[in-house]
């Protein structure tokens, strides 16, 4: 069983996480796995309250369930089993089943990837759209999708506000560039952060990107609208897609974000199985949570207003109900080709605690 467990966990850690921070740790006891959050792994402004990490852990748990079933085990997951300790995410009890089977999404686990390239603008077929919209098994998480051209332009513009604000905010700028790796060799050493090739920048933009790593340079260029140009270019890429989707929850407790993460992985794996490209466009949504928790200390009044207005526009575009909290937005589509590079993962042994 020990070998099976390590195989299951290796699949589980293929889950996405903010800045590829991989904020998890495991403790194995017999047939039970204890999953822990490592808050020091992600001090991002997008992860206030550990909401981003809870989503990542939800995605990991979904992978774990699928991989366990493929290996011939059922899973009994108990969230936050230790009262008062929100870093003890879950206990997962594995039980051998008599007839193993391969879940339809299993092969997609290791193929799932973020693709930041432009996609084709052609809409999905009715079969693809139905499968994507029905991919979530959790009734506490709602998925809404739009393929209207006007909506795509609106949502692309709002999504790109994140990058525009990031380039015009010293704290966010410095955090982001501290997590960019510029060479393949360095990325293979760190395995955390953004390898520059995953950002799919054309060569001229890649050279400029290196220059504006210096905040003084970026701040000077912003006087001439550089941060707005960044937003416009990103919006153009985001709009080149079949459509946009959101995930919303009513329960904004840590449990709610875990369930949102599980649903996200179901959607993403389904998109992968269908041969669709997929990219999260959720930065602004996590900034909304940061403002709620910390106020406006790290944002100017104008930036705060932009973030809050952008969130309202997203809700209006999808006709979301007042009590729905949008926690994730993504774009999807065919075409664009394979991503230039993929985020790397640590080996599962790096995450398993000693007995």
Image (spheres, rainbow, N blue to C red):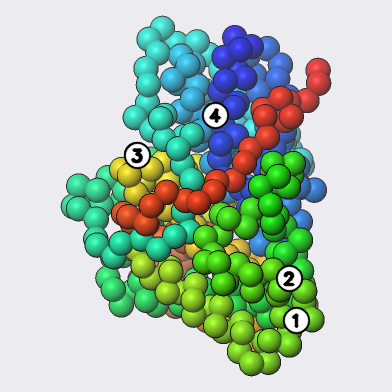
Q: Which of marks 1 and 4 is nearer the N terminus?
A: 4
* Image height of 21 relative to 178, above or below: above
* Image height of 182 relative to 304, above or below: above
Looking at the image, is mark 3 or mark 1 nearer the viewer?
Answer: 1
Determine whether label 3 and label 1 are within 8 Å by CB. no
User: Which one is in front, 230 or 78?
Assistant: 230
Which residue is rendered at x = 36% and y = 61% of the image? 119
Describe residue 294's horizontal placement relative to residue 128 as left or right.
Answer: right
Q: Which mark is residue 217?
A: 1
SS at mark 3 in the image: helix
Looking at the image, is mark 3 or mark 2 nearer the viewer?
Answer: 2
> Label 2, label 4: how many angstroms apart (C-alpha)?
35 Å
Res. 173 visible in picture = no
User: Which one is in front, 91 or 338?
Assistant: 338
Which residue is rendered at x = 47% and y = 51% of the image? 339
Q: Which mark is residue 11?
A: 4
Q: Which of marks 3 and 1 is nearer the N terminus?
A: 1
Q: Name the residue under label 2.
A: 213
Q: Which mark is residue 113?
A: none
Quadrant position of residue 6: top right
At which x and y percent is residue 66?
46, 28
In the current view of this chain or complex, which residue is farthest to the top?
A: 98
* Image height of 261 relative to 237, above or below: above
Q: How crowded is mark 4: few (under 14 residues within 10 Å), some or many (20 or more)?
A: many
* Image height of 200 relative to 319, above or below: above
> Label 3, label 4: how many angstroms apart (C-alpha)?
16 Å
Q: Give the quarter of the figure containing the C terminus.
A: top right
> Label 3, label 2: how many angstroms apart (C-alpha)?
37 Å
Quadrant position of residue 8: top right
Describe residue 47's horizontal placement relative to residue 205 as left or right.
Answer: right
Which residue is rendered at x = 79% and y = 81% of the image? 216
């Amino acid at each position: 069983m020990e070998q099976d467990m390590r195989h299951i966990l290796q699949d589980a850690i293929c889950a996405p996480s903010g800045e590829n921070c991989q904020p998890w740790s495991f403790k194995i006891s017999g047939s039970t796995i204890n999953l822990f959050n490592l808050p020091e792994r992600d001090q991002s402004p997008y992860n206030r309250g550990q909401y981003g990490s809870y989503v990542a852990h939800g995605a990991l748990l979904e992978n774990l369930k699928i991989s366990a079933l493929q290996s011939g085990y059922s899973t009994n997951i108990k969230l936050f089993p230790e009262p008062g300790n929100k870093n003890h995410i879950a206990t997962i009890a594995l039980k051998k089943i008599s007839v193993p089977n391969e879940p339809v999404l299993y092969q997609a686990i290791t193929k799932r990837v973020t693709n930041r390239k432009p996609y084709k603008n052609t809409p999905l077929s009715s079969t693809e759209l139905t499968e994507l919209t029905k991919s979530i098994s959790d009734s506490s998480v709602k998925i809404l999708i739009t393929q209207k051209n006007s909506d795509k332009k609106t949502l692309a513009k709002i999504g790109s506000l994140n990058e525009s604000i990031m380039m015009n905010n010293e704290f966010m700028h410095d955090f982001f560039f501290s997590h960019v790796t510029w060479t393949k060799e360095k990325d293979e050493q760190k395995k955390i952060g953004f390898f520059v090739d995953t950002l799919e920048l054309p060569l001229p933009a890649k050279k400029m990107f290196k220059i504006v790593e210096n905040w003084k340079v970026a701040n000077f260029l912003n006087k001439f609208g550089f941060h707005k140009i960044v937003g416009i270019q990103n919006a153009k890429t985001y709009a080149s897609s079949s459509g946009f989707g959101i995930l919303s929850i009513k329960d904004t407790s840590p449990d709610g974000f875990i369930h949102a993460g599980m649903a996200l992985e179901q959607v993403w794996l389904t998109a992968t199985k269908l041969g669709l490209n997929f990219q999260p466009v959720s930065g602004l949504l996590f900034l909304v949570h940061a403002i709620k928790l910390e106020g406006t200390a790290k944002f100017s009044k104008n930036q705060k207003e932009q973030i809050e207005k952008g969130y309202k526009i997203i809700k209006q575009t999808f006709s979301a109900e007042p009590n729905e909290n949008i926690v994730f937005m993504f774009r999807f589509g065919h075409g664009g080709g394979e991503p230039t590079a993929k985020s790397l993962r640590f080996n599962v042994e790096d995450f398993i605690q000693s007995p």
